[in-house]
């Protein structure tokens, strides 16, 4: 969404918040604000606090239109103020999704220089949903940084891992997260519904405190590698199953999610 449209949303929200505050001051007990599903955890905590005080507060979210309705017998001005601040923050974060070319420039920092121009790049659209920003002709798929996270983090992996990675993004969007045996993808690989390459495939992760698109540099850059090797064991690889300082090791050995971790010591 264009920045001008976001500004109009902020103006509309400011007016809606003013109306809500007026309604509260007039002792009406229902306040309706749109676009607040992203701060639902905060609202739920406030509601639980109100209930503990016997105030009969309840919360209902309308996921279809991204709205939230709060009905409370003791709505406080502090809640309305905090609600407004958090909602505005939510809108501002959404408005700060970088342009496609900036996302692409950052994402390919995790690719070798001779493969950056041909990599497929997946980033975020204006609603912070995953989208293919560039369809490449090479063997790498690169993930752009998520601006909602404080630190810069990008990754590039072999295209044969895309079904595994795409499924991970899908499960995360559904709120289903798991590591190790809790990862639903393991069973899907076992029963053949999720394709996973049998041969080793590399993922490179680059992290930092910031990215300068003008110079193409990552501040405080740190690189680590993950080599997916389904079913690999210490016996088949000669690698330890426990980490050592800066040394490669095998995580989740003997499983569909087995992978070699290579994490150099971080610069001081």
Image: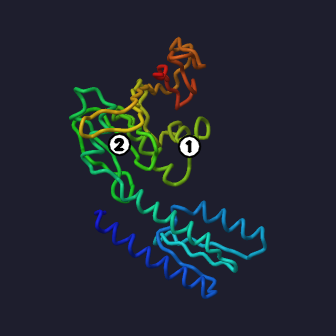
Quarter occupied by residue 107: top left
* Image coordinates for residue 238, horizontal then vertical, percent: 53, 11
Q: Is residue 35 above or below residue 102?
A: below
Q: Spatial distance from mark 2 to mark 1, Cα to Cα? A: 24 Å
Residue nearest the observer in this picture, 8 or 195: 8
Residue that carries the numbered disc 1 in the rendered image: 184
Q: Are marks 2 and 1 in contact (CB under 8 Å)?
A: no
Residue mark closest to the camera, 2 vs 1 = 2
Residue at x 49% of width, y 79% of height = 18
- Seen as rendered, the residue at the extreme top is 238
Q: Is tag 2's residue or tag 1's residue first in the polypeptide sequence?
A: 2
Whether 29 is drawn above or below 251: the answer is below
Residue 102 point in image, percent of width and height: 27, 45
From what the image shows, is residue 80 above or below residue 138?
Answer: below
Please name the residue that numbered disc 2 is placed on: 144
- Secondary structure of residue under mark 2: loop
Residue 84 visible? The answer is yes
Image side of residue 119 versus residue 69, left or right: left
Q: How would you rate the neighbour count of disc 1 (Cα within 10 Å): few for under 14, some for 14-19, many for 20 or more? A: some
Q: Is residue 203 visible?
A: no
Packing grade of label 2 (10 A; few <14, some 14-19, many >=20) is many
């Amino acid at each position: 969404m264009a920045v001008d449209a976001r500004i109009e949303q902020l103006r509309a929200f400011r007016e809606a918040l003013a109306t809500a505050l007026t309604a509260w001051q007039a002792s009406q007990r229902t306040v309706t604000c749109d676009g607040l599903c992203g701060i639902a955890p905060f609202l739920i905590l406030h509601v639980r606090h109100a209930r503990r005080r016997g105030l009969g507060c309840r919360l209902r979210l309308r996921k279809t239109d991204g709205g939230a309705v709060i009905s409370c017998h003791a709505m406080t001005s502090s809640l309305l103020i905090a609600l407004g601040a958090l909602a505005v923050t939510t809108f501002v974060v959404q408005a700060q999704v970088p342009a496609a070319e900036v996302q692409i420039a950052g994402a390919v920092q995790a690719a070798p220089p001779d493969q950056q121009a041909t990599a497929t790049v997946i980033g975020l659209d204006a609603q912070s949903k995953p989208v293919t920003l560039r369809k490449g002709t090479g063997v790498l798929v690169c993930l752009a940084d998520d601006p909602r996270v404080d630190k810069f983090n990008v990754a590039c992996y072999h295209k044969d891992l895309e079904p595994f990675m795409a499924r991970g993004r899908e499960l995360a969007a559904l709120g289903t997260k798991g590591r190790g045996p809790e990862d639903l993808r393991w069973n899907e690989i076992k029963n053949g519904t999720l394709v996973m390459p049998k041969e080793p495939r590399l993922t490179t992760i680059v992290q930092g405190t910031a990215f300068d698109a003008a110079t193409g540099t990552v501040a405080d850059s740190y690189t680590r590698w993950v080599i997916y090797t389904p079913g690999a064991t210490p016996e088949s690889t000669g690698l330890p199953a426990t980490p050592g300082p800066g040394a490669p090791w095998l995580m989740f050995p003997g499983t569909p999610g087995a992978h070699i971790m290579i994490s150099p010591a971080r610069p001081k």
